[in-house]
Amino acid sequence: MKLKKLATAALAMTFVLSGCGGSEDDGKNVSSVTGKEKFVVGMECNYAPFNWQSNEQTDTSVAIGGAGYCDGYDVRVARYVAEQLDREIEVKKVSWEGLQPALNSG
């Protein structure tokens, strides 16, 4: 039961933090590769199986800048949501304590 509550909380946090790239269309929230608007998700990438960081790319992982790749259930759900919105997924690795301030500051 505790695992189910943790999974629900992690999924909810994924949706809460999604789209924290700003609301203004200033060109910063558009992929230079695909030209699609980005779907930005902040996560800690530290809690397998929900999200974790790896040095190796897989079919389901998302690059985290120069810091490797993030993968897990949260990443897969975020990729699905981004696909449904016809956006490109971008994961930003943020410490747990920094998630709320990052969301508030855009």
Image (spheres, rainbow, N blue to C red):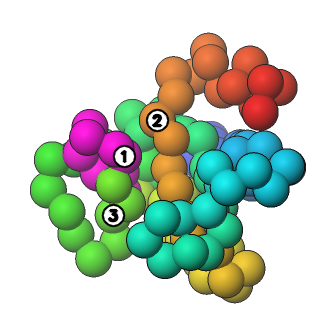
Task: Return the residue at label 3.
Answer: 61
Number of the label disc, if any, that sits on residue 19: none
Main secondary structure found in the magenta portion: loop
Name the amino acid, label 1: Ile
Tell me if residue 68 is in the magenta stretch. yes
Residue name at image x 15 percent, y 47 percent: 55
Q: N-terminal of the two: label 3 or label 2?
A: 3
* Picture layout, residue 99 above or below residue 81: above
Question: What is the magenta range?
Answer: 64-71
| C-alpha separation, residue under disc 3 versus residue under disc 2 | 13 Å
Q: State whether residue 39 is above or below residue 106.
A: below
Q: Position of residue 74 (x, y in %)?
A: 54, 57
Helix or strand or loop: what does disc 1 sit on? loop
The spot of residue 32 in percent (x, y) is: 48, 64
Cβ–Cβ under 8 Å for marks 2 and 1: yes
For the question of whether residue 48 can be seen, the reply is no
Q: Looking at the image, which residue sits at the far left?
A: 56
Residue type, mark 2 in image: Lys
Q: Quickly name the residue at label 2.
A: 93
Q: Residue at x 57, y 22 (%)?
A: 96
Left/right placement of residue 22 relative to residue 83 reads: right
In the figure, 81 relative to 74: above or below? Answer: below
Would you call the spot at circle 2 few (<14 residues within 10 Å), some (14-19), or many (20 or more)?
many
Q: Where is residue 49 in the image (x, y as percent from the top left)?
A: 39, 52
